[in-house]
Image: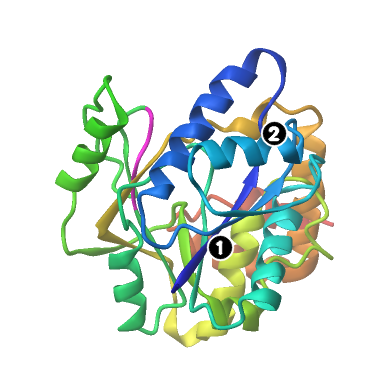
Amino acid sequence: MKIIHTLPVMIRSECFRDDDLSMARACFESLRSSEDHLVVLYNQGCLSNDNLRALLTSCGLSAVILGHGENIGIARARQTCFEYIWKHHRDVEYISEIHVDMVFPRNWYVPLLDFLANSDEPMISPGIVTMYGELQPSGLDVVTPDDTEADLITLLGELKRDEVVEGFVHPVVHKARILREIGGYDTQFLRGKQGYEDDSLLLSYYYYMGTRTNWRPKCYLKSWVYHATMAQRMTLPDKHKEFALNEEGLIRQYGAYGLMRLSNIHRNPSAFDNLLQKIIQQ
């Protein structure tokens, strides 16, 4: 086993429940088709662990379930999954971050592992197709099939090309050794339940690689994954407070220069200007 997948799982209640369960089943069943399909999950609600395990078993998926249905936040959940792997699977070479609103072709990670094995990059992403037919990171559009997951998998296969482009999307595959060296998500700073966790991790890699390299994240387009990008957690209450907590943590951790680096990493000079001006004017 070369790779273990990490996944915070949230099944929302009431009007979202059926859609979330259908989405989770499609994700789990597609993961099961790959050779390395062990997943370390963090249960963030609203299913009990027993019900979540029953769903996983019905999909034939191997999984370790952490947590007990409480939403402790994205960074803490993912970090808990990382630390479980570092403790119990010290020899695994790669760790992925996946989402419940994804559909995966068989062995989708293999080109990504091959790429990492032959490069100095600490992490790599595939290309993704969203529910709106947008290709990321290119921003181009494609017509997505309305019928079955099998048709979607066929489309993902047709998009493959041997090309590396700059950009950042989820899922992400990390070199486990380097992820452990940078420490993963620093929840001393990321105390909110969502917001800026990706930016914090990207800055950790940026400084790990050295500022003179002007490192940016990359996508290897020999692998494609469907990521609906449902923005599932944007329906949760108090999301703005959680973002504000992590915004404060990001600034405390990396300061003004970190924000300038992020504008460069994302190739969007204005992306963090407002945050930067807020710091300067304090």
Q: Which residues are magenta?
A: 127-131
- Label 1, label 2: how far apart the Cα atoms are: 40 Å
Q: What numbered label is drawn on residue 51? A: 2
Q: Residue furthest top?
A: 15
- Amino acid type, label 2: Asn
Q: Is residue 224 above or below residue 175?
A: above
Crowding at label 1, few (<14), some or many (≥20) Cα neighbours within 10 Å?
Answer: many
Q: Residue at x 63, y 84 (%)?
A: 181
Q: Residue at x 15, y 45 (%)?
A: 158
Q: Is residue 280 visible?
A: no
Query: Whole-percent x and y of residue 247?
Result: 75, 52
Q: Is residue 190 above or below residue 87?
A: above
Q: Is residue 211 above or below residue 60?
A: below
* Rendering quarter of residue 2: bottom left
Horizontally, residue 233 falls left or right of residue 127, namely right
Secondary structure of residue under mark 2: helix
- Amino acid type, label 1: Leu
Sequence-wise, the earlier of marks 1 and 2 is: 2
Query: Whole-percent x and y of residue 85?
Result: 64, 71
Residue 128 is covered by the magenta coloring: yes
Residue placed under numbered mark 1 in the picture: 262
Secondary structure of residue under mark 1: helix
